[in-house]
Amino acid sequence: QVQLAESGGGLVQAGGSLRLSCVASGLTFSSYTMGWFRQAPGKEREFVGAINWSGGRTYYADSVEGRFTISRDNDKNTVYLQMNSLKPEDTAVYCCTARPAWRGIAYQDTAYDYWGQGTQVTVSS
């Protein structure tokens, strides 16, 4: 049974930083592309970023490019989302996702097979 468990969310002031973690189990982690999505109240879920199986390639939404960084540690079955210069509009539930690496990178949520429960990030102004 595949499980993705996020942690690290919380309340932070605008301009602050948070690092989210997502630990995966039940799959061969290094064979999966990992993604991060977020959903704010009343809005559709949106792509934040993704990282390929080796960590050598990362992809970001324009809204977070230059502020957020995705990394992974395949020995720890963990993917990270470092978020800097946070803005109130970054407030959302952040979820990590997994997709078999052979299918490549995807930006649509429907392209990912496994999802975590999410962690709340709230940025106050």
Image: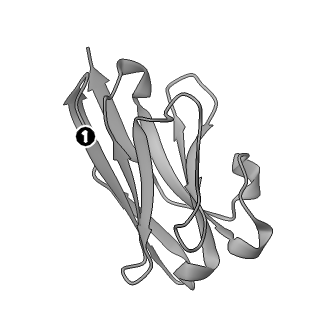
Task: Report whether 29 appears left or right of 81.
Answer: right
Q: Please indicate, yes or no, whether residue 1 appears anywhere in the rendered image.
A: no
Quadrant containing the N terminus is bottom right
Say which quarter of the image contains residue 115: bottom right
Q: Please indicate, yes or no, whether residue 41 appears anywhere in the rendered image.
A: yes
Q: Amino acid at mark 1?
A: Gly
Give percent across and percent down for residue 24. 46, 74
Indicate the secondary structure of the residue bearing disc 1. Answer: strand
Give percent across and percent down for residue 16. 22, 31
Question: Which residue, as the protein is rendered here, is positioned at the far top?
Answer: 125
Position above or below: 41 against 106: above
Question: Which residue, as the protein is rendered here, is positioned at the far right?
Answer: 103
Position above or below: 34 against 84: below
Coloured how? Answer: one colour
Position above or below: 61 against 33: above
Q: Residue at x 43, y 21 (%)?
A: 89
Q: Residue at x 59, y 36 (%)?
A: 61
Give percent across and percent down for residue 51. 56, 60
* Tag 1 residue: 10
Give percent across and percent down for residue 104. 75, 64
Say which quarter of the image contains residue 46: top right
Q: Residue at x 76, y 75 (%)?
A: 102
The number of numbered discs placed on residues in the rendered structure image is 1
Task: Report whether 85 appears left or right of 81.
Answer: left
Quadrant containing the C terminus is top left
